[in-house]
Amino acid sequence: MRIVTFAASAFVVLGLLAFVGNAADPTAKPTIDPIKANGEIFVGWPKPEFALVISGELDGYLEPCGCAGLENQKGGLKRRETLLNDLRAKGWPLVNLDMGGLVKRDGVQAEIKYKYALESLVDLGYNAIGLGVNELSLGNVEAVSVALMNLDPAKNPVTSANVGVYGLDESVEMGMTARFRVVEAGGKRIGVTSVLGAKHIAAIKGRADIATIPPAEAIAKVVPLLAAEKCNLQVLMVHGDPAEAATLAQQFPQFQVVATTGGAEEPPSSPKVIPGTKTLLIEAGHKGMYVIVLGFFADAQQPIRYQRVPLDSRFVEGPKMKKRLVDYQKELATATFEGLGLKPVAHPDGEFAGSESCAACHAAAWDVFVKTPHAHATDTLVKLDPPRHFDPECLSCHVTGWNAQQYFPYKSGYLGLTETPLMTQNGCENCHGPAAAHVKAESGEIDATDQEKQALQVALRMKIEDNEGNKDGQKYGEVVKNCMECHDLDNSPDFDFQKYWPQTMHSEK
């Protein structure tokens, strides 16, 4: 089997100025050329007999999220829609497969997001979708079963050989899942099944509402059923890791393609042939940044071609997925924070005062702050289309007084544009800590001795240590740890504290 590879270039690190500028302006024009940055796709490809489009581990990223600006990031269902439409317009028969992992967190918002992600993939014409450990780990299994039961039975693509909601047989009988699917495309029959890996089965062990059996046992039961279907190609999706997927491929060599989760964030530039087999091992990466397209041709010299497709700004927004995103944001707004299970809690260090309370006494620092993207963080959400200022996953780093990683508000923090206008933007207290007591003491609103005032001042000071930073060889100190609450690897992978700090540096008593 000869494989011709046309791969996108490695991920391009964005310049810091682009990083800072586009965070404040969601309408900014692209600062990089996506084709120059990520490479051309499908170079020299003729029309295939059919093509597999393989994705997985969306991880809740219905669209890209981060400080580099959407135009400089990869991923998003709106772009995936455009890719699929473009390929169909060329007359390519498509078989769309997803390995599962549609969400990453738990809670009510994750349950809502799973429903929208699943329905979106159905709208995009997916033929088989696996069950991932994160959706199965949602505390409320009814959120999963209701999402599955609400799908049109004729279009339901959810597939699992070894997982069943409420029971293996029950899940199939109720129409929530199927053990395998047979898809016809380009005059060929493609058989597909999916399994949850052993490590993930162990993670949900003890869930009475979810039934599982070992992957190999399940595959052994499906193999004769697929053989009876006389498929031209058989595909196994493994929601596990590459090592387990390779082992299963060696046990069951009738699968010519095995797709796996658990690999690198960026998929390989070319596929691997699993040792001892002729089977291709396919990884699709994380966060929906890429899809893999395998083209099959009636060509003995080049029967299969492989393309890693970066979902970058070369793909315009797809209208169906944009409407899905609008509906998702509307549901979050209708649910309210309370309906999403978010109850404000007291911050251990006190109450928030709002950044404007800092301006009078800290004028020099304020002059620096108002020129940074932090001072426009909430505005960014409001200006987006659709707006995101009801979305806790966005608000946590775009307002004042929220827990950045756990996505919940503190009692004196932001609760809404009209309810708490002084808590908009990513303000001073997100770094320095709640300052209401300090403000009241300095303004005379409460009686405080000089010693008490000094103690309140000291509590808000932050000291950058020598060589403090977030890169190898630098000291990972308290200031950087605080920055990384929002500028984490998920949302700000190119963040470099030592380059960024000079643009926001402020120091005064």
Image (cartoon, grey):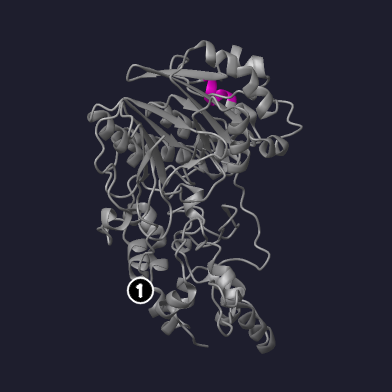
Q: Is residue 47 left or right of residue 371?
A: left
Residue 145 seen in this snapshot = yes
239 or 508: nearer the viewer: 239
Residue found farthest to the right: 206
Q: Quadrant of residue 127?
A: top left
Count neighbours of disc 1 (C-alpha within 10 A) and say few if under 14, some if 14 to 19, many if 20 or more: few
Instruction: Please determine whether, in this image, residue 424 is positioned above or below residue 316.
Output: below
Please give the count of numbered marks on the rendered protein.
1
Q: Is residue 40 magenta?
A: no
Q: Which residues are magenta?
A: 145-149
Q: What residue is at 57 percent from the left and 69 percent from the top?
A: 482
Q: Is residue 137 left or right of residue 152?
A: right
Q: Quadrant of residue 14?
A: bottom left
Identity, as a three-letter code, of the amino acid under mark 1: Lys
Which residue position is annotated with label 1? 371
Q: What main secondary structure does the magenta stretch of the protein show?
A: helix
Q: What residue is at 58 percent from the left and 44 percent from the top?
A: 105
Q: What residue is at 29 percent from the left and 29 percent from the top?
A: 48
Instruction: Please determine whether, in this image, residue 61 is positioned above or below residue 345.
Output: above
Q: Quadrant of residue 164?
A: top right
Of the 4 image quadrants, the one containing the N terminus is top left
